[in-house]
Image (cartoon, grey):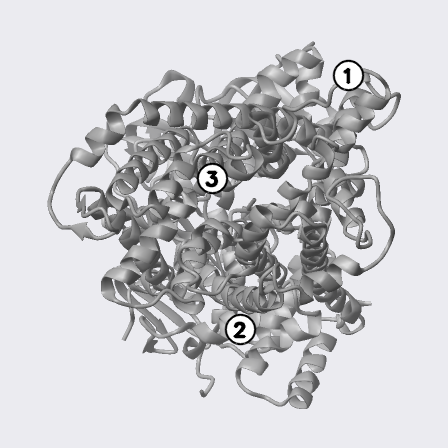
Amino acid sequence: MAVLRGDIELAGLTKSYDGVHTVVQGINLKIPDGAYCCFLGPSGCGKTTILRMIAGHEDPTDGEILIGGENVVGLPPVTRGTAMMFQSYALFPHLSVRDNVAFALRIRGLSKADRYRKTDAMLEKVRLSELADRLPAQLSGGQQQRVALARAAITEPRVLLLDEPLSALDEQLRVRMRLELQRMQRDLGITFVHVTHSQLEAIALADMVVVMDRGEIKQAGPARDVYAAPRDRYVAEFLGGQNVFSGRVDAIKDNLVSFAAPQMKHVAVPAGSSRVGKGDIIDVAVRRDDVDLIRPGIDLAPDTSSLASRVLAVEYQGNFVKVMLDATGEDEFVAYVPERVFFRDPYTIGDVVQATWPCHLARLLAKTTSPTA
Amino acid sequence: MSTAPQAVTMADERMTKRAIAPSRGGRPWTFYLLATLFTCYVVALYGPMICIYILSFQDVRGGLVFPMKGLSLHWFVDLFTQVRTGDVKGAFDRSIKLAIVVTVITVVVSFMAAMAFRRRFPGDNIVFALMIGSLVAPGLVLGIGVGLLFNAIGIETSPYASALGAQLSWTLPFGVLVMFAVMSRFNPAWEEAARDLGATAWQTIRLVIIPVLAPGLVAVALFGFTLSYDEFARTLQTAGPQNTLPLEIWSMTLNVTSPSLYALGTVTTIISFLIIGAALGTIVFIQRRRGARAS
Amino acid sequence: MRVSRSTISWLYVSPLMFVLIPFFVLPILVVLVASVFETDGFGGLIPTFTLANYATVLTSGLTFNLYLATVKFTVLTWFFTLLLGFFVAYFLVFHVRNPLLAIGLFLICTVPFWTSNIIRMISWIPLLGKEGLINSALLRIGLIREPLEFLLYSGFAVVVAYVHQLTIFMIVPIFNSMARIDKRVVEAAIDAGASRFDIMRLIIVPLSKSGIALGSIFVASIVMGDFFVTKVMSGGGSASVVSAFYEDISVLQYPGAAASAIVLTVVLLAMVALILRTVDIRKEITR
């Protein structure tokens, strides 16, 4: 089996159980060779199902999966050149670390000497040599994760599929293991497809983030694009770091949209290329760390949007302070104020403040079809 | 009964979620009450059996009740030599051979059935209901049914046909229920991982499923052996002309009034204990071997 | 080519069916068929269709007495095994602090299960007999003048033998249910001010229900289907439905015996089905 390219293409990929309940709805996606791709979404959004379909543990109801340009639907996992790292690792409990890692080589019929030579080299790579004779039950979570990684990597796959690889670990270990995954991906030079519900994990690791909701892709792109320029309310809210609020369009002048509601009379948003008309209700996003707070009465620079509001709560976060405001009615509105800035003139609950940001930093969001908008 | 082996193999797991008794401080009065009850139960459980073991070592004057009359192996010799007690040696031989066959079949078939029952399939409830039915049906009625059936199609009843089948109709439901409990600890992701690493279905069974479940399979074997070795009601009408051991004991209880009956009890119990010891030893050995490589 | 999953499941389960069909379904059907035949009086069957055998079975006062005796033994045995089994399991799970000790004690309870039932039954003879240990002890301390006759070869002895054999069938499933009860649930109840009796009534018993149901199925079906213990331990004094069946068979009264067997089987299955309605044992075991 020649190792070919590890680019993946999903075309019209659909999965439905019992023909009624569709969990993946006609996904189209291209993942380039050697990319680190994260599927991000809440549980039940279909991300794991996609991963399992790529791995060959589930068959799509419809659509195609191409790996290295070759349709793999219907092929058994082993001929796809993929390897999967299972959620909570699924290490064989009766086999030592070495035998776990050597399993695939044993299946391929390598002699004991050959497979142990290769295995020991792999264990070296993941720094598990001293633990080679342990049983999985005798390992810590982080060590188990490395064994799982080694066990998958030894098959020399062109695509490594990781199902929630970090969710079984505690917070500190998770950060360390993130680095480990990144290092492995660079070393191996293969495509990683990683499924997670943690946006922190996704944007820290991925070259390409795929945000999913109810079996559909909401947005796919480089981590920074998805985080900084979410396409719609769902993506903005799921990735966090954004204030999202909606308003009725009053006028569009000089490519700036202004709003009808009186409390939003000082808000203007660049219309960009989106087509909006007077009377439309639109979603606006502005990054929480782009919002400045100033006391009322202070003059604003031109081209600055502002919302008058009251402080609802203040949460100290260490390197910044999270100030929650009642600026946008039902929508949560938060400002991340740098710690030093905040404590120069601290706000307390009930203070009246103006939340301001340069107009060009706000973004119009695409109208979501979901009723949550 | 399905969980006796679990208790053996899952001892460590139980440790984590056990015992409401306060971990410090004095015992509540209920402890002493229940401890007394438990002690009485164990005494009543073992006491009578120990009595007959002791009484079986009497000499030729021995009777069926205490006090002991002398000390000898007379009744053991009597058991295997006297014609009037029937063919005890042959019955042992037949029962053990039959039990071994039943054990092997029970382990294999229960394992396969439990594999099927891991997911739902059309008709699974019917199979399950038949199994429970077979478990609770009166053994003698079933035995006679088998006898009549063989009669009707013109086959002689014999240990390795009718008796084997009748015993399996009893050991298999037990075996499958035990396998259910054993299987519930099996993570299906192990199987998928094996498949992902290129294993065929057969390799997955051989290299992953069977080794992981090995202690449970030993437990099923112990069930199969004991239930067959001790089976009476279903075997009575199906064993053919020659007796199995329980049938032999049954006929002895009706005619023999000497301590050789007790001697027989002692011998069968020794065999039972050897079998239990072998089974537990095997389970410990499996666990040890896993642990040894790990040290 | 891919084989469908349900085909694979059926392949796996087929050996089981190859045993259950010829050795459970067909024999029961044979007995059913025999129950509507007539006998020629010499063990031969005359293929007809008659419900006369059922009429005889269902109208005879003898049948009524047999069922009464069987039900009596079943209920008594069930009651005592449940009582013992429940409290033994409760003691092991909730009162023994050292978990390894609890497992050890549990194993002590289960070991006799693996030894011969018949031998365990016989072993009561030197204890309960006229000159047995109990009678001689009672005589010696002067509590009685005459040996107690009811100890052996009596209904009492039958129940003793059943309880001795079958309590384990209660202990194991109840132990298993109780071991799964989250200790914190009980602690929460204590925090809420529940007394020991409240905890027992409101938490332990409801959460052990499935174990109790499973144990009851085992005990009831074994006692109702048994004839051996009744025959030996009652000294022929008591009969049960199955022992009467056995007598009928030995005098070649197949159709009558078959009719009675079918009635018993139906009663048993109905009882088990009723218990199973309250607890899904398949889910219970596999969970």
Spot occupied by residue B178 in the image (x, y as percentages of width and height): 53, 51
Q: Mark 2 belongs to which amino acid?
A: Arg
The chain letter under disc 3 is C
The CA span between labels 2 and 3 is 44 Å
Q: Secondary structure at mark 1?
A: loop
The amino acid at mark 3 is Phe
- Name the one closer to the observer, A371 or A365: A371
Q: Residue at x 38, y 16 (%)?
A: A262
**Label 1 marks which chain's residue?**
C
Nearest the viewer among B138 and A69 is B138
Residue on which disc 1 sits: C144
Q: Is residue A61 left or right of residue A116?
A: left
Q: Are marks 2 and 1 in contact (CB under 8 Å)?
A: no
Mark toward the viewer: 3 or 1: 1
Q: Is residue B236 above or below residue C241?
A: below
In the rendered image, residue A70, in percent from the top left (x then y), is placed at 33, 78
Viewer-closest of B54 and B67: B67
Q: Along the horizontal axis of the image, is A349 left or right of B77?
A: left
- Position in image of residue A95 (x %, y %): 66, 69
Q: Looking at the image, which residue is at 70% across and 70% down? A: A96
Vertical arrangement, residue C6 with respect to residue C75, above or below: below
User: For mark 3, what is the residue?
Assistant: C227
Mark 2 surroundings within 10 Å by alpha-carbon count, few (fewer than 14), some (14 through 19), many (20 or more)? few
